[in-house]
Image (cartoon, rainbow, N blue to C red):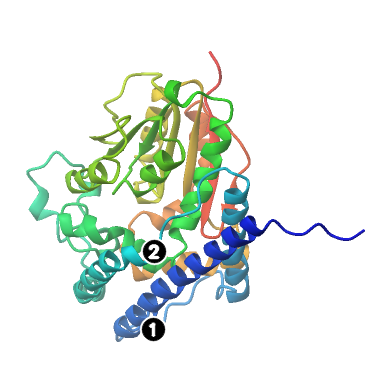
Amino acid sequence: MAESPRNPLRALSTAKYVAGQGVRTLWYSGHYALLRRNMGGFSRPDEPAFKPASGQPSFKAMRREFFKAYQRDLANIEAGLYPRPRDAQPSQLPAALRRSRLFLKDADAVNKRRLERNGTEVREETRTGNYPAYYRQNFHYQSGGWFSDESADIYDTQVEVLFTGSADVMRRCVLGEIAKLMKGRDQRQTQLLDLACGTGRFLASVMDAFPRLNATGLDLSPNYTEKAKDEVRQWKSAEIIQGQAEAMPLPDASQDIIVSIYLFHELPPKVRPVVAKDIARVLKPGGSFVFADSIQLGDTPEMDGLLEYFPEGFHEPYYKHYLTEDFGKLFSEAGLEPSEPDPVFLTKIQTWKKPDA
């Protein structure tokens, strides 16, 4: 039997996706290559080259998982779980060039902190604020930590460069999990919380897919929350509030869905269970928590060595402990029930449910 001809509109949509994501990958890969050339790799001068205990990562496995993430993203889009990304458009080039200049201008200062192992530059500057000590650091050695408009402006560029353009792809796969949870729900009767929403980039993609959803983005940074407000301003049912993840300014049993992306690896071990318990408190009975963060040791064994490199090149004071944290135990003790974890390239996605009352 002859194969049926492929839908030309679908083929065109696929071609646009491949072209757009290809442009993004080249753009951010070029930035990454330039950054690595200027900073001279992960090792510092006069120090022996770092050798991961797990052995050198498999670049074949990295390429495989990298492309699998894009295949999954495209499959989700073609299944109607969320819209095709609207990036890599000619109209966006001026803004991309501006952020590129700011990113490259800041790179020397970031590298200077890396060489000096100075990850607490902002601590003195933020003594007057009501912020926990663990938060008052220059995570990733970024200028201003979480406490400057400039940091908020280039943060998403920094993340995309680190992941060579695949950060949004991994985030959209998280959006795919939310889409499955939204099936059969009335958006207007559903409350979603983006915990540690940062600049609001992910929440904007949630609202783009579900424009009548009642959504809240919560973050502790005053500068990032202002950036997030701009990101979601067009949606009247979305709001941004400032607050701590371990003491959320939200009522008990008020959220149907909570999502956190790349939060837990930046929390101290003693704070993680506190945040988990507050997530359980804020969730409605029957509600779901979508956890998305770095894969851990053993999730994709061929890439374990790569995970060991990360805290060597960036200021991530709690990442080594994160790699072996027992999240099954942590969230179960908070009263949540797990689904199977789902690795997507360098991100692990897992949904936890609060039992019905």
Q: Give residue 143's quadrant in the image.
A: bottom left
Q: Position of residue 60 (x, y in %)?
A: 62, 75
Secondary structure, mark 2, is: loop
Query: What amino acid type is highlighted by mark number 1?
Result: Pro
Could you tell me which residue is drawn at 41 percent across and 59 percent down?
87
Query: Mark 1 highlights which residue?
Result: 48
Q: Residue at x 39, y 64 (%)?
A: 89
* Quarter residue 159 falls in: bottom left
Residue placed farthest to the right in the image?
Answer: 1
Task: Assess whether mark 2 and mark 1 are in contact (beta carbons under 8 angstroms).
Answer: no
- Return the disc, 1 or 2, that comes first in the chain's sequence: 1
Q: Nearer the viewer, mark 1 or mark 2?
A: 2
Is residue 25 left or right of 99 when viewed as pictured? right
- Amino acid type at circle 2 is Gln
Disc 1 residue crowd, few under 14, some 14–19, many 20+, Cα 10 Å: few
Residue behind mark 2: 89
Residue toward you, 153 or 21? 21
Q: Position of residue 77 (x, y in %)?
A: 57, 50
Quarter of the image with the N terminus in it: bottom right
Residue 334 visible from this viewpoint = yes
Nearest the camera: 302 or 87? 87
Task: Please name whichever residue, 136 or 30, is drawn nearer the observer in this view of the structure.
Answer: 30
Query: At which x and y percent is residue 7?
Result: 69, 56
The answer to whether one can see residue 295 in this image is no
